[in-house]
Amino acid sequence: MESIIKTWLVVLIVFLSANYFKQCVNGKSQVPCVFIFGDSLSDSGNNNNLPTSAKSNYKPYGIDFPMGPTGRFTNGRTAIDIITQLLGFENFIPPFANISGSDILKGVNYASGGAGIRMETYSAKGYAISLGLQLRNHRAIVSQIASRLGGIDKAQQYLNKCLYYVNIGSNDYINNYFLPQFYPTSHIYSPEQYAEALIQELSLNLLALHDIGARKYVLVGLGLSSSTPSLFNYKLKSLVEHFNNKFSADSKFIFINTTLESDAQSDGFLVSNAPCCPSRLNGLCIPDERPCYNRSDYVFWDEVHPTEAWYLLFATRMYDSSNNPGFTYPMDFKHLVEQEIEMEYDITSQFSASS
């Protein structure tokens, strides 16, 4: 049985590599750019120079990443790294903290370890770039893109074709609501009220993104550390339905139901209750300690962040959920980016020529 599972995983990796190779040979990505908003599940280096303990720019983080430790909270690539490869990007989307010399027309990663939808989330442990501050950073990038493309109107036409990936909210529970000794939220809000407050604040940020060009959104739900975040996921899916109805003429929103990713053993993972790397009290890897050698057998890299192997499975299902109905709603990445794809290339070529 174990050999069958391992064979299935090899086939999965071959599938991923084949798609990526095909797209790179064609020399074009399926969307012109990707903008990433979130927390440590997507951070690629934005926390490296911040006054915070939420850092991962040291070994053994990055042990399987081509450039070594970069600030990614895993042993290799994150889910969004793999998604961008599936979309045909030759390079990873650069973190906002290190965009010097990068082609911002391909996108920017604003995610920050510890970040939440709420401004105060994680503040008891250190500094994090909240979703609102990430949006402020994006506005600065949009201004630069407008300067390159010859005005805000042309910039918005270009940005309309890009992908906006938002994976945030976990810290608003584990580093806010579930810590009543540091934050008053659990005394102020019932679980239902808190989920609603988070969704309302997230909604305002998504509308602000829409005002500056966002049209294709991917909203990732929360993994369930308890029953409480399921309220958030239910409301997030409802928000996707609401926005798809409200903006049916020009925008598409999809919801990723991460709660379906719960049966690790049937997916070939032998260890789902222990980290691969020796970990500190804060859940992160102890610097320079040797991790497990069989990393593809583990769900978790440290106490809270998945391994690249788990991200590979997760990202592949996000991209094409035809064999996993219910994992994405109302469509997957593949179908989202296929819409109007020929026009996207025409517009991209036009802007490239004018710049």
Image (spheres, rainbow, N blue to C red):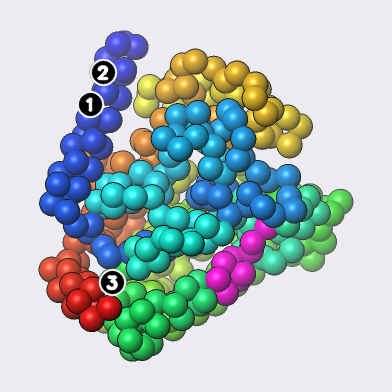
Residue occupying the point 23% across, 81% down: 354
Q: Is residue 164 above or below residue 269?
A: below
82 sits to left or right of 127: left
How far is mark 1 from mark 3, CA to CA? 32 Å
Q: For residue 7, which numbered disc appears in the image? A: 2
* Residue 145 as seen in the image, left or right of residue 184: left
- Residue under label 3, please give it: 161
Q: In the image, what residue type sits under mark 3?
A: Lys
Marking on residue 11:
1
Main SS of the magenta part reads helix
Secondary structure type for disc 3: loop
Q: Residue at x 19, y 41 (%)?
A: 21
Cα distance between the residues tagged 2 and 1: 6 Å
Within 10 Å of the Cα at label 3, are there few (<14), some (14-19), or many (20+) other Cα atoms?
Answer: many
Q: What range is drawn magenta here?
A: 128-137
For the C terminus, give its image quadrant.
bottom left
Q: Is residue 213 visible?
A: no
Question: Residue 340 placed where, x, y %?
Answer: 17, 70
Residue 324 is situated, as x and y percent measured from the top left of the image, at 29, 42
SS class, disc 1:
helix
Which residue is nearer to you in this view: 236 or 103? 103
Q: Return the disc, 3 or 2, that comes first in the chain's sequence.
A: 2
